[in-house]
Image (spheres, rainbow, N blue to C red):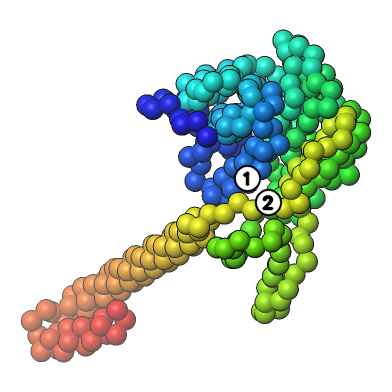
Amino acid sequence: MPPRTAGAPRLIEATGERIVPWAQDAQVIYEHFHRYLWARPLVAGRRVLDLGSGEGFGASLLADTARAVTGIDVDERTVEHSRANYVAPGLEFRVASATDLSELADDAFDAVVAFEMIEHVGDQQRVLAEAARVLAPGGLLIMSTPERRTYSDERDFVNPYHERELTQEEFTALLRTHFPTLSMFAQRAVAGSRIEALTEVAPGHLAVRIERAEGEWRPAEAPEPLYLIAVASDAALPELPAESSLLDYGLELIAEREATFRAELIAKHEELVAAHARAQRAEDEARRVQESVAWRLLERIRRTVYGVIGEDSAVARGVRRAMQRLFRAIG
C-alpha cells in the first residue's frame, strides 16, 4: 500500500457513510480492508476504476498491484481528502457520479471495483450500464453489497445511507443484465483460531466452524452471508480463490468488545449510584418535612398548655418532658 502522505490533513469525518482507516469499529475495518486486499491479485496489471472510492485507502491498496487506478466519488470534499492523502504513480481521484461516467471513454478500464456502493444508489441499472460501457472486452466487475435479509431484515436494522438493498437473488439478476459470466462469494466477519504450516506441505485449505447452542459448543454449518461479493465479466473469469482469510493477531475486535462491556458496566454502576443518591435525598427531605410538621404540631400544643398552667410550674416541666418523648417517637 502506498504510504499516506506525511502531514496530510483529515478533511472528512467518520460518519458511517464512508469508511475511514481511523474508524473505531474493528469489524467494519476488517470487512472493508478484506475486500480490497482480496481484490488486489485480481486487478494485478489492470487499469482499474474504483467506484465510490471514498476516503481513498482502497484505491491506494489496489494501486499496489494494478497498472493504474482511478478513484471516483460524488463528494468533492472527499476527493480533495483522497488527493491530499494518497499519492502514487498511476493513482488519481476524480469527482463524478457512478450513474454518469460520461467523462470516461468506452473500454477505458480492465476492471471496475465497486465495494459497498450500489446500495447507496437508486438507479442501480444505470450504474451497471455505465460500468459495462467503460470496461474493455473481457474486463472484470468486482462488486459487493450487503445481503438485505441478514444485514437488515433479521437484525431489524436500518442504515440511513442506503437507498436500496438487495437480496442475493436480486443482486444476481441485476448483474446478469450486463454480465453473463458470474461468480458469487459470501463475506462475514469471524472470531476464531488459525493453524498454518511452518514447513513445506501440499497446498490446500481446511475450514472448520463451531457454534454455541443450548449452552454447549458444537460443529456448525456455514452461516448465511452478511455481504455478497461478485466477480462478473462478459468473458470467462480468471481463476478465483475459493476462500480467503483476513487475520488480526492483535484481536482488536475482542478488545473492542471488552472495552465496550467495561464501559457499559461502569455506566450502569454510576447510574445505580446516582439512583441511590436520589433516593437518599428524597428520604432525607421526607424526614425533614415530617419533623417540621411534628414540631409545628407540638409547638402549638405547648403554647396552648403553657397558656393554661404556666411555663415554670412543676406540671409544665412534666408536660415538657412528656412532649419531648412524644416528639422523639414521632420523629
**Above or below 75: residue 150:** below
Comes first in the chain, label 1 or label 2: 1
Locate residue 33 relative to residue 110 in the image: left or right: left
Determine the residue positioned at 25% across, 83% down: 328
Residue drawn at point x = 83 percent, y = 43 percent = 183
Instruction: Measure the alpha-carbon separation of dots 1 and 2.
Output: 9 Å
Residue 207, given in percent of the width and then of the height, sits at 71, 63
- SS class of the residue under badge 2? loop
Q: What residue is shown with label 1?
A: 34
Q: Are marks 1 and 2 in contact (CB under 8 Å)?
A: yes
* Amino acid of disc 2: Ser
What quarter of the picture does the C terminus occupy?
bottom left
Q: Residues within 10 Å of mark 2 (few under 14, many from 20)?
A: few
Q: Is residue 330 left or right of residue 12?
A: left
Judge left or right: residue 232 versus residue 279.
Answer: right
Nearer to me, 291 or 113? 113
